[in-house]
């Protein structure tokens, strides 16, 4: 085995929860919640001291976001107008935690697809937009479940966690600190979405992905050369989640809306599109690549309109589904996992020599690009 210190993507893995919520089911339950709320508060609404809530609509959701359905880990409590939130049995310390369980499923698939024995992996990064607990790290639990002798840690860069994880893994390969690194992104976004908020209740879905980043010297014959990675962050409050261990104790905040996902969607749209498009074009130039020649873009899956605009600015024309595939319709926004799902489901047909881009963007703001070339 001759190490090259050149990082490649050897394979990817995907875990998709069985349960699905369609827009029709989501809107029916949301509207039932609204009707209950308005009936319960009828007197205050009539007196002008409380505001009536408005119905959501399937047409709005599809038009504004491109989302038609999402997978979730616990459908029934999310759709129950009395709960409107996922619920599950708390697991004991001896049981595998939920994020570790779905991350492990994705990781095992990535290992299997690469023909890689877990014993040959050096490191596990759990890169996701929320962690089930502060410590011990989810990544170390996954490492232990796979029987990996090495190191593991969690990292959170919201929707850009996976691309930041890929660059981190690639840097370990470049530096010779590791030859095989698993980047696992279990995203149980249903736990931090406010299902009672009309502006955002349709956005997220649950999933887990894994990316096996390795030294080219040990990679399977078919793999993806990493041509370049670039990361960027710019502070913004426009996507925010205030949940944290320092506010845990305030009882009035226990289930408060500000401890869940909130965003200024319009501002995000306006500010992030130009930032990301420019970043991609600049990085392509640095790599001496013509962005218009990229065979496929696997963009972060937040919103169909954002992806359309970014792809257009990068390719110089309106991208079709083949050039910029979307998984938004069936998965919704799955935070950091979105671009990896798009890559996992839409990359086998590319030919040796084809180039493409995995790109994420989201809270922080944060954005990450990973330019790849297929090697067969
Ligand atoms: N059903 C029906 N109508 C709704 C609705 C719903 N669920 N939610 C909002 N509306 C209404 C609003 O009340 C508003 O009505 P008005 O014009 O009478 O005031 C109208 O639809 C437009 O609302 P707005 O919030 O401005 O919608 P939008 O067109 O900006 O789309 C997003 C909302 C969130 C889909 C969009 O801003 C977006 O995708 N932003 C990108 C941010 C993102 O995806 N972030 C994810 C994290 S990376």
Image (tube, rainbow, N blue to C red):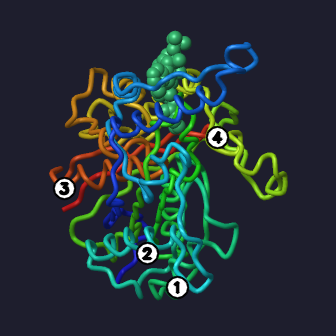
- Residue 299 coordinates in the image, percent (x, y): 38, 40
For residue 348, which numbered disc appears in the image? Answer: 3
For marks 1 and 3, give the one nearer the viewer.
Answer: 1
**Secondary element at image label 4:** loop
Return the disc, 4 or 1, that comes first in the chain's sequence. 1
**Residue beneath label 4, please?**
364
Numbered circles on residues, count:
4
The reply to whether dot 1 and dot 3 touch (C-beta < 8 Å) is no
User: Would you call the spot at circle 3 few (<14 residues within 10 Å), some (14-19), or many (20 or more)?
Assistant: few
User: Marks 1/2: CA distance?
Assistant: 16 Å
**Secondary element at image label 3:** loop
Return the disc, 1 or 3, that comes first in the chain's sequence. 1
User: Marks 1/3: CA distance?
Assistant: 31 Å
For residue 144, which numbered disc appears in the image? Answer: 1
- 98 relative position to 331: left or right: right
Return the disc, 1 or 2, that comes first in the chain's sequence. 1
Q: Quadrant of the N terminus?
A: bottom left
- Residue 62 coordinates in the image, percent (x, y): 34, 27
Res 168 → quadrant: bottom right
**Residue beneath label 2, please?**
180
């Amino acid at each position: 085995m001759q190490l090259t210190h050149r990082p490649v993507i050897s394979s990817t893995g995907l875990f998709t929860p069985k349960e699905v919520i369609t827009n029709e089911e989501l809107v029916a339950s949301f509207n039932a919640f609204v009707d209950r709320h308005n009936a319960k508060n009828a007197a205050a609404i009539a007196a002008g001291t409380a505001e009536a809530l408005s119905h959501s609509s399937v047409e709005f959701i599809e038009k504004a976001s491109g989302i038609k359905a999402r997978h979730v880990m616990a459908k029934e409590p999310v759709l129950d107008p009395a709960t409107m939130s996922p619920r599950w049995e708390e697991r004991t310390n001896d049981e595998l935690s939920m994020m570790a369980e779905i991350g492990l499923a994705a990781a095992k698939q990535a290992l299997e697809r690469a023909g890689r024995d877990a014993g040959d992996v050096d490191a596990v990064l759990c890169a996701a937009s929320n962690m089930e607990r502060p410590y011990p790290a989810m990544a170390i639990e996954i490492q232990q479940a796979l029987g990996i002798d090495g190191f593991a840690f969690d990292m959170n860069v919201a929707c850009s966690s996976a691309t930041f994880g890929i660059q981190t893994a690639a840097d370990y390969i470049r530096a010779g600190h590791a030859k095989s690194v698993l980047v696992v992104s279990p995203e149980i976004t249903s736990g931090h979405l406010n299902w009672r908020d009309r502006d955002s209740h349709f956005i997220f879905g649950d999933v887990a992905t894994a990316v096996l980043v390795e030294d080219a010297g040990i990679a399977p014959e078919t793999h993806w050369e990493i041509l370049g990675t670039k990361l960027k962050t710019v502070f913004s409050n426009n996507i925010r989640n205030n949940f944290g261990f320092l506010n845990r104790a305030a009882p009035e905040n226990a289930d408060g809306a500000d401890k869940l996902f909130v965003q200024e969607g319009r501002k995000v749209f306006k500010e992030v599109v130009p930032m990301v498009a420019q970043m991609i074009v600049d990085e392509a130039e640095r790599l001496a690549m013509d962005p218009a020649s990229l065979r496929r873009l696997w963009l972060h899956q937040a919103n169909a309109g954002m992806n359309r605009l970014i792809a257009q600015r990068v390719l110089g024309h309106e991208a079709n589904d083949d050039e910029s595939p979307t998984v938004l319709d069936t998965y919704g926004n799955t935070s950091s996992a979105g671009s990896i799902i798009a890559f996992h489901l839409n990359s086998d047909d590319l030919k040796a020599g084809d180039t493409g881009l995995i790109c994420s963007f989201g809270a922080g703001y944060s954005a990450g690009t990973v330019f790849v070339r297929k090697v067969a």
